[in-house]
Image (cartoon, coloured by chain):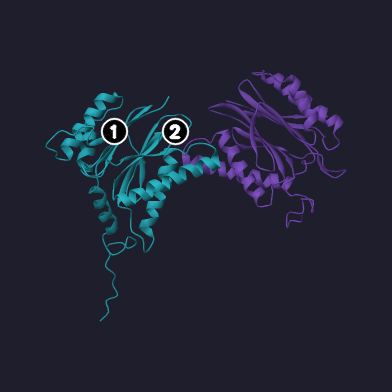
Amino acid sequence: MNYPTNPLFNSGKDPTQIPPVVGTTGVALKFAGGVIIAADRRASMGTFIASTHAKKVHKLNEYTGIGIAGLVSDAQSLIDIMQSELRLYQLENNFRPSVKVASSLLAAIIHGSYRRYQPWWVQLLVGGVDRRGSHVYVLDPSGSLSEEDYMAIGSGTLLAMAILESNWKDDLPKEKAKEIAITSLKTAIGRDTATGNGIDGIIITEKDSEEFHVEL
Amino acid sequence: MYDSRIPYDKSAAIWSPDGELVQLSYARKASERGAAAVGLVLDEKTILLAGETLFDPLVVRPDKIQEIDNNLYIVAAGLSTDSNLLIGQARIVAQQHRLVYGEKISVRALAARLGDLMARHTITGGLRPFGTAILLAGFSPIDKESELYFVDNGGSYFAVNAYAAGSGNERVIDALRKQYKPGLDVESAKKMVLEIMTTALGKKDSLTEKEVEIRILTTD
């Protein structure tokens, strides 16, 4: 069957069959009192490294962060939309939107586009700390949303996930959680060609947030 | 000869020379003809809503206090058809919020949305203002604290500790201003509201929960 659709869909194939989003490894995990989001810095165009310092971890507001994988323009555009939407939500409601509100809105936007055959070509990790505690949500181009304790996205998902899976525990201390995040990304950088050039991350806690960087 | 001046009480969207929207004053009168509605914040976790239901043995007692979403209620005073439109709209807005944001709408945001709708009816030609004023009660989705909002016929909305709409509203509000204090227990609050309504509405016999629908909203 042929669908009049986004060129990113392989023509002749069922457009609802989404191929994996390429490039990047991103991880997010909860720890005692906060969340960590981290990702590598490589942006790839096939075998060419388009950027060695791509920024893949951003903040949506003071206490909500996002890790991106996939089409950079789509992700940047979604981040811009979400920063405005969350600001508007806060003004209209007079309280800070929860991490669930941010992720649900993202999922609604992404799923709406998916149903119109114009998907946002992104995998996202949304993490943050609100009055209900710390949260990690993962989203894909179909607009699915699920809450996780830890999760990885991008081409290095399996490599990073193996490290997270065998090391993550409830209520990890911050330094230990940061170490696990870095180890999982270093594993992906070592064995995935679309991942590399260092690590950027943010640590969000109840009080504040801080960035960290790892040069290789 | 044709008189090009338009009488300034013919449309809600025309000012009088005194700077008044005369149709809006008429709309407020319409809501004051409606059965009385009262709301009180008893404490951070408890709200009392009361609505007079007009008694007719032939008519099954209608629900004066209407559920909008889980633990989110509206009591409206005025033209019942206008109230029904607003209540229907409130329920749709509440569910839209759940669909998009994944959690319940706040009382403030719902009051703002209904207020906007009602205000639009005072600035758009061909429409008339709502003959209804409403009290919205519920709990903020994050802090789970009592929130009570009043929305006037013209769409202005504000948070209140205790307020009234409908028949005898000025006298009820005056009485509440003197008698309301935060931290009332449920039984004495019920008694106080029934007494205030009896006096304000000029009833010969004391009103009871037979004539006044009372609902206590609580959260944990």
**Disc 1 element:** strand
Displayed quadrant of residue B186: top left
Residue at point 73% right, 54% down? A6
Amino acid under label 1?
Answer: Ile
Residue at point 28% right, 33% down? B214
Give me the disc on residue B214: 1
Q: Chain of mark 1?
A: B
- Image side of residue B153 versus residue B175, left or right: right
List the residue tagged with mark 2. Answer: B140
Q: Earlier in the sequence, mark 2 or mark 1?
A: 2
**Looking at the picture, does residue A20 appear above or below residue A171?**
below
Q: Which chain is purple?
A: A
Amino acid under label 2?
Answer: Ser
Whether discs 2 and 1 lie on one chain: the answer is yes
**Looking at the picture, does residue A15 appear above or below residue B197?**
below
Give me the disc on residue A113: none
Displayed quadrant of residue B11: bottom left
